[in-house]
Image: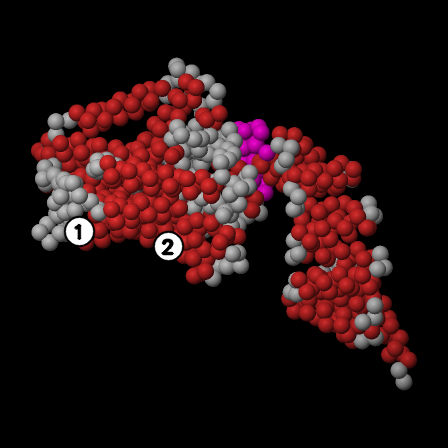
Amino acid sequence: MALCEVYWDHQIPLPKPFLIHAKVTVALVALLCFINSYDGEFVFDDSEAIVNNKDLKPSTPLNNIWSNDFWGSNLSSNSSHKSYRPLTVLTFRLNYLLAGGLNPIGFHVLNIILHAAISALMINVFAILTGGLAYDDKGRMLNLAPKTSVLAGLIFAAHPIHTESVAGIVGRADLLCAVFFQLSFITYCKAFSRGRHDRFSVQWVVVSILLCAAAMLCKEQGITVLFSEIFQKGLLTRLALMGLGGLAMLYARWRIMGTGPPAFTEVDNPASFEENVFLRIVNYNYYYCLNAWLLLCPWWLCFDWSMGCVPLIKSATDWRMGWLLLLWCFLIGLIKQALYSPDRQRRRTTTLALVLLVVPFLPACNVFFRVGFVIAERVLYLSSAGYCLLLAFAFGHCCYRWSKYRNLLRVCMLVLLCFYMARSALRSHQWQSEKRLFTSALSVCPLNAKVHYNVGKNLADRGNTTAAIGYYREAVRLHPTYVHAMNNLGNIMKERNELIEAEQLLTAAVAIQPDFAAAWMNLGIVRNSMRKYEDAEYSYLNAIRFRKKYPDCYYNLGRLYADQNRHVDALNAWRNATMLKPDHSLAWNNMVILLDNTGNLGQAELIGREALRLLPKDPTIMFSLANVLGKLQKYKESEGFFLRALQINPNAASFHGNLAVLYHRWGKLELAEKHYELSLNLDPEAPGTRDNYNMLRRKMDQLKQLTP
């Protein structure tokens, strides 16, 4: 069951550490590499998985996380990605509760701690894979390859490929999956009786299967731990237990998720849409080459590898075919060592390292089902452990074979570790903000339209629309059917009053994707501004047809009807907006103003009071209701709403001006004078205020002349 002490291990130029010291050292290296991401923002996919995910909020029933996907969408929805990770979402929810809201620091700190713990625990996994299971007289598990396992743990702790999983909060799924993967593997190893080859504990195997299920509830690839464990021992009973457990988990997952696969587009994974089977297989293998290269040399890292970042191989004469041959020559060499090496220890270590490298990667390899990405660095989190063990084994073996070059080999390994640590620190710094993250990708994937789109969106969100235009145009140039870039660029053109180009862009977007509701709504806004009222109405109605619950579109449709003096239609549209979104302040306010302007003061008052019950701190609704009450000669109540609005927004010139008009009508001339002057100080060009103020002064002068 156990091997003798690993012969190359003592040749590795490291001090023989105590286990606790080794784990603390590895954990500290992990913390040192990624600690500077602790105060990062929510970036990239964090927006959908955390910021906009209602399942994190205490007001959402806890049961929802068991029926929704990772992004908060119902699993039965056609738009669901079928990522069923309820335990990961549960930890997000706990972060939210502990922080009292969306504070990214708590999310980041937990990710960093998890990676440090995983790195330390990985020493146990590496020790078992390299030296086998052995126990001392007191029943404690022995580490027969202490230096190899510690060196592999150090490489794992510092590897830059982990940055996305650690510094990106959604990488929590990979971290939690890795924790339960390790615990399942170690628990499985505990199932074997000490010193006995033919006995094992059924209870420990069952616990291992349950931990595997927990790993799968954190991320789908967690089930691969079962395939890693079968290489440890070959009893039929154990294999039957594991097989039944795996089938039960897959069946439960199938029942929860349904039979429909997630819907991915060609831009997500272009190779999977290649009709020629040979070229499809060639491109899949090229993706494997790129993943292997990122493990070997993690310098070129990018948050997204889709949309032209990796051009497809279209013929057998493409020079990149050489990388495929190199990869398979290397793999075949490793497999030959694993199967036919006369050295039993080398066979064992190579075999199990290859298993750890390949098996966790299988769900992302496109063989069993289509995945929604070209390359995703996060899926290499567990697979990188196999690479780290292979590297540590190769280093130890080289030190054993070429002992006279040990100092040179030590320097090379030290340089590699320093490079990994520096690269991890730099990359985690880039993950601190979307600006740094997106900009860093421009040099890695200049052909990726999504990179340019995200840089442009980030600039636009920060108010730099002029710079954003260039990036949006480049995104459309690289990917002429990129409807989201067209939509955002069209919005900027609309804001700059370049309506003709805005209409062209948005028309092209809806022609490419006819169910793009947001683009239809924006097209309606542009056409309304161009006074193309019929076309605008058609656009709005299309938006509502493709998105039934679209309160903003109903609001804009109401504005269109108001411009056409279709008052009843406008009120109905705004009422629909408030029914779909009860806190839609603009729709409520417009209803009050329209009813006020058309002389329906009683109805305007009712609507205003209804709105304030839902939005008791909205100053614009208070202001509009105060105007209505003033016209109804309910001066005292009107004054109260004006003063409450001014407490919230004391620098609103219109609030002071209309309160002055109220006092003017009410006969409180000195208060009217005061607020007219405050309004004019805030906005000297306020329409009508100067005339009203002059009228008041004349009236006050006349009263003074009449006073004896």
Q: Where is residue 27 in the image (x, y as percent from the top left)?
A: 26, 51
Specify whether 676 is left or right of 243: right
> Can residue 221 be seen in the rendering of this structure?
no
Residue at 54 percent of width and 33 percent of height: 475
In the rendered image, the quadrant that contains the C terminus is: bottom right
Residue at 49 percent of width and 39 percent of height: 258
Residue at 30 percent of width and 36 percent of height: 227
Taking 86 as reference, is 371 above or below it? above
Residue at 45 percent of width and 39 percent of height: 254
Kind of residue at badge 1: Leu
Q: Position of residue 175 (x, y in %)?
A: 35, 47
Mark 2 lies on residue: 109
Give the residues drawn in magenta, as a range.
Answer: 465-483
Specify whether 183 is left or right of 496: left
- As helix, strand or loop, the secondary structure at mark 1 comes to helix
Q: Where is residue 298 in the image (x, y as percent from the top left)?
A: 33, 36
Q: Which of marks 1 and 2 is nearer the N terminus?
A: 1
Q: Does the magenta stretch include residue 251?
A: no
Kind of residue at badge 2: Val
Mark 1 lies on residue: 19
Q: Are marks 1 and 2 in contact (CB under 8 Å)?
A: no
- Give whichever of 42, 239 is nearer the camera: 239
